[in-house]
Image (tube, helix red, strand yellow):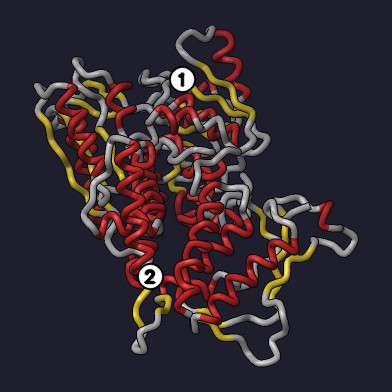
């Protein structure tokens, strides 16, 4: 059997070719008496033969650690019995539901979840990650978010200001594009196409709701799926079902903090999760709520909140019931009464009463409903779908409105934007195209032709003339080549990895005549 689809002999052969090529080009050194093979891949146990191995499980053991230049030095640092697919980043093990320790700083008044505190912790992680990547050269610019606001709704303008302020706090460049309510759908689509084509834009969202004369589905579908950081593109919502079929090039991996959130995206099988469902589930995890094996009820089946939340809870191995406006009153009351976890997202103020929930249930209130209140400057106040004081007396944990799920929605938008920027800024072809000031072509044929031209120029730049007139690989060129080859050798079943091997052989073909 093969490791990542490769026979062991072929795997070692390819790795040795990479490392031999690095040695010939003067970009890697090996200590004396280092032996013949720098990297061994062995079965998990002595009793197992290669034909018994699963392609998702392997052990990497170093005989002697070589010194490699550039980013490759960390590539061979010991990865022991880690599992994953779709790239080396995907090797990190997931942290199962219920394994997150309960964090008391996130709980106030005995059982109230402080969504603002949890969101602040997430934003701090995002900011630290961005700053570190800018320092170590993994980022050559700050992540960029584009927000489109149509019309002059007060609530929409408030939400956009919150997102803009959060982006500024974590180090994401935010640009708001305002259009009058009289703007046509064609005008909006033209702006979306322009932002799709701008390679410096990592994330793009359209603030909802849109004016009545615009088709929300059509407009959201126009956003490039790889920039849909709000997670509302039909492909992102639909692919929540394809939890084991991640998009090509994914596999960020990690075990905690932002990296752990990115790994959750991979497990979900989508490019981005919708921010509110993503934030609701993350809120529960960070407060130590065990999801696996629990009975969960989601009230509301909207494609923006209710349905994705039910899917995400199901992926955490909860037993989920989805209730909606057509559910019978008897079934609704019975299922709510038996639920360990209740997520209310119906848009009906105070629907869940104190007597409806069992003692110790966890209640997440996603509803945002304005109710008249003359004492408020705006003339109204916001309440959720839950009668807060009544339910608080029975709940084990409960989220308030405001200050519960809302801040987490914005925090998850920052996570998604950072994730998008990581994917884009780690793509050498996109970096080269961006450096040339090129915009994405709408026509696939023209786009492929243009990318081919940029790739050829990028490869030529990897070669430089030595003082004696011969050629040598640049440091970053050989580092990228070895990294690409190692990734391909371990995950040959993925399309991008196979492309990495093609790049390696092309580099060898170009460089061998000059070495």
User: Which residue is drawn at the image coordinates 56% and 43% (left, top)?
Assistant: 267
Reading the image, the residue beneath label 1 is 301
124 left or right of 71? left
Under tag 2, what secondary structure? loop
Neighbours of disc 2 within 10 Å: few (<14), some (14-19), many (20+): some
The residue at the far right in this view is 47
User: Which residue is drawn at the image coordinates 38% and 41% (left, top)?
Assistant: 226
Residue 23 numbered tag: none
In x, y percent, where is residue 422? 39, 55
Of the two numbered discs 1 and 2 on the same chain, state the one appearing first in sequence.
1
Q: Nearer the viewer, mark 1 or mark 2?
A: 2
As rendered, which of 452 and 278 lies closer to the eye?
452
Under tag 1, what secondary structure? loop
59 left or right of 286? right
In x, y percent, where is residue 248? 50, 44
In x, y percent, where is residue 15? 63, 68
User: Which residue is drawn at the image coordinates 42% and 31% (left, top)?
Assistant: 365
Count every numbered label the image shows and give the total.
2
Residue 383 appears anywhere in the view = no
423 left or right of 374? right
Reading the image, the residue beneath label 2 is 462
398 left or right of 218? right
In x, y percent, where is residue 21? 55, 75
Neighbours of disc 1 within 10 Å: few (<14), some (14-19), many (20+): some
Q: Is residue 440 above or below residue 101?
A: above
Q: Are marks 1 and 2 in contact (CB under 8 Å)?
A: no
As measured in the structure, the alpha-carbon distance from the residue carrying label 1 to the one carrying label 2 is: 52 Å
Q: Is residue 501 above or below residue 358?
A: below
């Amino acid at each position: 059997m093969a490791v990542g689809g490769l026979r062991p002999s072929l795997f070692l052969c390819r790795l040795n070719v990479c490392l031999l090529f690095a040695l010939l080009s003067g970009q890697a050194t090996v200590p004396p008496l280092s032996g013949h093979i720098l990297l061994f891949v062995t079965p998990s146990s002595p009793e197992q033969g290669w034909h018994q191995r699963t392609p998702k499980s392997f052990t990497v053991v170093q005989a002697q650690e070589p010194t490699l230049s550039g980013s490759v030095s960390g590539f061979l640092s010991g990865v022991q019995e880690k599992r994953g697919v779709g790239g080396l980043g995907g090797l990190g093990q997931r942290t199962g539901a219920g394994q997150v320790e309960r964090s008391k700083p996130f709980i106030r008044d005995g059982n109230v979840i402080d969504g603002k505190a949890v969101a602040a912790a997430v934003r701090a992680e995002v900011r630290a990650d961005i700053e570190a990547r800018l320092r170590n050269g993994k980022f050559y610019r700050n992540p960029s978010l584009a927000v489109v606001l149509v019309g002059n709704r007060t609530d929409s303008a408030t939400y956009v200001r919150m997102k803009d302020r959060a982006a500024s706090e974590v180090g994401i460049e935010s640009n708001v594009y305002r259009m009058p309510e009289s703007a046509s759908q064609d005008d909006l689509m033209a702006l979306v196409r322009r932002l799709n084509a701008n390679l410096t834009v990592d994330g793009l969202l359209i603030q909802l709701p849109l004016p009545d004369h615009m088709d929300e589905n059509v407009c959201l579908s126009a956003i490039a799926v790889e920039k849909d950081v709000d997670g509302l593109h039909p492909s992102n919502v639909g692919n929540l079902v394809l939890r084991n079929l991640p998009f090509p090039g994914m596999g960020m991996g990690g075990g905690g903090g932002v990296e752990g959130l990115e790994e959750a995206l991979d497990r979900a099988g989508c490019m981005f999760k919708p921010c509110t469902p993503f934030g609701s589930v993350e809120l529960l995890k960070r407060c130590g709520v065990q999801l696996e094996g629990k009975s969960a009820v989601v009230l509301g089946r909207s494609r923006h909140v209710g349905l994705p939340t039910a899917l995400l809870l199901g992926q955490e191995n909860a037993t989920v019931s989805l209730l909606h406006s057509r559910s019978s009153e008897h079934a609704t009351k019975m299922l709510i009464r038996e639920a360990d976890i209740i997520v209310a997202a119906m848009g009906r103020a105070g629907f869940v009463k104190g007597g409806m929930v069992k003692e110790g249930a966890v209640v997440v209130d996603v509803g945002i409903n304005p109710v008249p209140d003359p004492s408020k400057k705006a003339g109204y106040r916001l309440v959720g779908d839950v009668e807060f004081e009544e339910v608080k007396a029975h709940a084990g944990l409960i989220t308030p409105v405001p200050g519960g799920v809302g801040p987490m929605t914005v925090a998850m938008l920052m996570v998604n934007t950072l994730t998008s920027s990581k994917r884009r800024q780690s793509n050498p072809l996109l970096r080269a195209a961006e450096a040339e000031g090129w915009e994405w072509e709408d026509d696939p044929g023209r786009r492929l032709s243009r990318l081919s031209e940029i790739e050829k120029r990028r490869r030529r730049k990897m070669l430089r003339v030595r003082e004696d007139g011969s050629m040598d690989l640049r440091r970053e060129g050989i580092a990228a080549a070895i990294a690409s080859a190692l990734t391909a050798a371990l995950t040959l079943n993925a399309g991008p990895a196979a492309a990495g091997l093609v790049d390696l052989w092309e580099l060898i073909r170009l460089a061998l005549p000059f070495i």
